[in-house]
Amino acid sequence: MKEVDARGLNCPLPLLKAKQALNQLDSGDRLRVLATDAGSVRDFKTFTELSGNLLVESSESDGCYTYVLQKV
């Protein structure tokens, strides 16, 4: 699983880095994204709804948000 570490970056950079990484993946591959921007929760939910990609997992621990996306 590929991982993007976007901790310390503000909106919209975590989402942009995730989109760039997803473009390099094959259908069915998964991407883990780490972010510290609280706005990323809304951004990733909206992005997956609009793009058709799947938000497999979304969690938060000590101010670090973890997302697992699956490319369709």
Image (tube, grey):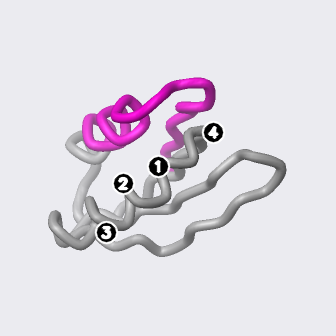
Ranked by sequence position, the earlier of labels 2 and 3 is 3
**Mark 4 nearby-residue class (10 Å; few <14, some 14–19, many ≥20):** many
For badge 1, the amino acid type reads Ser
**Mark 3 nearby-residue class (10 Å; few <14, some 14–19, many ≥20):** few
Please state if 11 lies on the left or on the right of 4 as rendered: left
Q: Which mark is residue 40?
A: 1
Residue 20 belongs to magenta span? yes
Residue 46 belongs to magenta span? no
Q: CA distance from mark 2 to mark 4?
A: 13 Å
Q: Quadrant of residue 26?
A: bottom left
| Quadrant location of the C terminus in the rendered image | bottom left
For badge 2, the amino acid type reads Asp
Instruction: Please name whichever residue, 19 or 62, is drawn nearer the observer in this view of the structure.
Output: 62
Q: Secondary structure at mark 1?
A: helix
Q: CA distance from mark 4 to mark 1?
A: 8 Å
Q: CA distance from mark 2 to mark 3?
A: 21 Å
- Is mark 2 in CB contact (under 8 Å) with mark 3? no
> To which residue does mark 4 refer?
36
Q: CA distance from mark 2 to mark 1?
A: 5 Å
> To which residue does mark 3 refer?
28
- Is mark 2 in CB contact (under 8 Å) with mark 1? yes
The magenta stretch is: 1-21
Q: CA distance from mark 1 to mark 3?
A: 23 Å
- Is mark 4 in CB contact (under 8 Å) with mark 3? no
- Is mark 1 in CB contact (under 8 Å) with mark 3? no
> To which residue does mark 2 refer?
43
Ranked by sequence position, the earlier of labels 1 and 3 is 3
Q: Residue at x 71, y 59 (%)?
A: 60
**Mark 2 nearby-residue class (10 Å; few <14, some 14–19, many ≥20):** some
Give the residue furthest to the top: 8
Ranked by sequence position, the earlier of labels 4 and 3 is 3
- Foreground tag (1 vs 3): 1
